[in-house]
Image: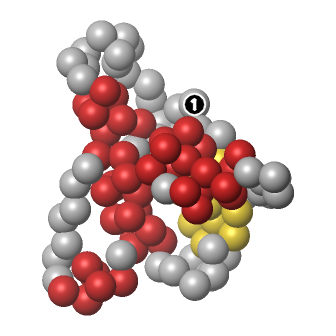
Amino acid sequence: MASSKVQERWQANTNTVLERNKYMFNNALLSDVKFAFPDTKRTIPAHKYVLAISSPVFFAMFYGDVAESRDPINITDCNPDIFLHFLQFTYCDEANFQDVDTAIEV
């Protein structure tokens, strides 16, 4: 779940870039894009920089010649929980799947 309260001096309480990325995962702090799932009325905050350095598709989407300017970006063909698994891998370099079907969807 997204953090609603910013931990004081969170940067000083983490030792690595990976730990700082984990803190920012699903956290609205400094986020500059939101993904909306109209069927569930959920939104998920994200950070264009993190996504762009992880994927040429996101790089083109946010920084290319025809960069996306809509916010939020509606996603209609993916379950928000599956999208969170994808973001967890992108931010945290971790993949924790409960079952094979979830892994396949991600």
Judged left or right of residue 76, residue 68 is right
Q: What x and y, as percent, mark residue 74?
A: 69, 70
Compared with 50, 97 (above or below) is: below
Specify the quadrant of the image occupied by residue 5.
top left
Point 17% across, 83% down: residue: 99
Could you say which is closer to the camera, residue 32 or residue 48?
Answer: 48
Question: Looking at the image, can residue 34 be seen?
Answer: no
Point 30% across, 10% down: residue: 12
Question: Looking at the image, can residue 104 be seen?
Answer: yes
Q: Mark 1 points at which residue?
A: 30
The image quadrant where one finds the C terminus is bottom left
Q: What x and y, as percent, mark residue 59?
A: 61, 51
Q: What x and y, as percent, mark residue 38?
A: 67, 76
Point 24% across, 23% down: residue: 16
Circle 1 SS class: loop
Judged left or right of residue 60, residue 11 is left
Q: Which amino acid does label 1 sit on?
A: Leu
Specify the quadrant of the image occupied by residue 71.
bottom right
Could you say which is closer to the camera, residue 11 or residue 67?
Answer: 67
Q: What x and y, as percent, mark residue 29?
A: 53, 32
So how many labels did they put on this image? 1
Compared with 14, 51 (above or below) is: below
Q: Residues within 10 Å of mark 1 (few under 14, many from 20)?
A: few
Judged left or right of residue 52, residue 21 is left
Tell me the colour scheme of the image. Answer: secondary structure
Compared with 89, 53 (above or below) is: above
Could you say which is closer to the camera, residue 90 or residue 53?
Answer: 53
